[in-house]
Amino acid sequence: MSQQPPIVDLRSDTVTRPTPEMYEAMRTAPLGDDVLGDDPTVHELEALAASLTGKQAAVFVPSGTMGNQIALASHCVRGDAAIFEEEAHILYYECGSPALIAGVLAWTVPSVRGLLDPGEVERRILKHTLHTPGTRLLCLENTHNRAGGTVIPMDYLREYRSIADRHNLKIHLDGARVFNAAVALGAPVSEITRSVDSVSFCLSKALSSPVGSLLCGDSDFIEVARQWRKRLGGGMRQAGILAACGLVSLRTMIDRLAEDHRRANDLAGGLATISGLGIPNAPETNIVMVQTDARADVWMRALRERGVWCYDFDPHRLRMVLHKDVDDAGIARAVEACADVGRSLIP
């Protein structure tokens, strides 16, 4: 029997498997009890994350969603208003947690491909009065998931900081893929995070760790965040096993993100030649948004039958995400599978 070729899994960069170095790091990691504050590998990871982002401290959390929600709860008082881009991950994919956990009013701003107009942000800031909630927080997302991995330019980040300072706001960055943004901009991640008060980022996306995120900020903020982590059940015991993978991610997996970005452009270029598909915008990082003439769910099922997995993001839009476990041969297979589906859908 002929062996089936491996699946080309483009559903998300969360599907990556640990590297051999990560498995070895897990095996040999010095351990303690992180809830009791004595896991040395967690301490090392948190110190490295704080250093890379230019912040005073960091806390290791199980997920990006938890990191974001802890940030909202730590920055805000129940009943405060916070400003979000209208399709922000925090609002779209975190199960209503801003209302349920932090008790904040979500004040949304439309955008162009995830990029907020600074003037529109400033116009939506509310002063606390007898009748209105005060705006305490601006939330940004970089890269922006639903916009297709778009990057916030540095001058916009500086303008948001200026607005926040004028109105005494804090800024939290949902930086699940902020290292992708840094690589795309050709700048250290600390240049991006300089403009924000706190940042969460995922180890378990394109950085390829199996589990975990970091929330970074000043020391007082992180002390409050640790209490919220405990409240939400995010305290883990011998968490150094997982933190060891995070150290490998931050030391060895950042520069290679450029390969994912290059492959995203290669994939987009190949798909743009296929009848029934379109690429409205060239990918900026590792996410390719694909417009489909036929229904996207039809494309998704047909591609899955051909060993290429992706998601129907909207009725006529597919999302494909590049990561370390998709190589050039996988890109070629994905393009050929799409061409085959395109031929089958032509009347």
Image (cartoon, rainbow, N blue to C red):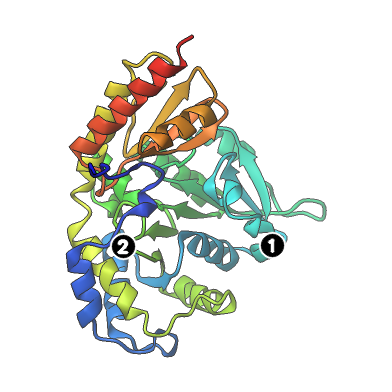
Q: Is residue 42 visible?
A: no
- Residue farthest to the top? 347
Q: Amino acid at mark 2?
A: Ser
Which residue is drawn at the image coordinates 48% and 79% (left, top)? 235
Secondary structure beneath dot 2 equals loop
Position in image of residue 213 (x %, y %): 40, 64
**How far is mark 1 from mark 2, CA to CA?**
29 Å
Q: Which mark is residue 57?
A: none
Specify the quadrant that holds the N terminus: top left
Q: Earlier in the sequence, mark 1 or mark 2?
A: 1
Q: Amino acid at mark 1?
A: Leu
Labels 1 and 2 touching (C-beta < 8 A): no
Residue 69's place in the image compared with 167, above or below, is below
Position in image of residue 233 (x %, y %): 55, 77
Q: Nearer the viewer, residue 340 or 142?
A: 340
- Res. 35 image quadrant: bottom left
Look at mark 2 in the image and give the residue it sits on.
Answer: 209
Q: Nearer the viewer, residue 229 or 157?
A: 229
Look at mark 1 in the image and give the residue it sits on.
Answer: 100
Q: Nearer the viewer, residue 17 or 83?
A: 17
Crowding around mark 1 (Cα neighbors within 10 Å: few <14, some 14 to 19, many 20+) is: few
Q: Left of 56 or right of it: where is 254?
A: left
Secondary structure beneath dot 1 equals helix
Q: Is residue 181 visible?
A: yes
Which residue is drawn at the image coordinates 42% and 37% (left, top)? 304
- Residue farthest to the right? 131
Position in image of residue 314 (x %, y %): 55, 31
Q: Left of 295 or right of it: where is 182?
A: left
- Res. 124 image quadrant: top right
Crowding around mark 2 (Cα neighbors within 10 Å: few <14, some 14 to 19, many 20+) is: many
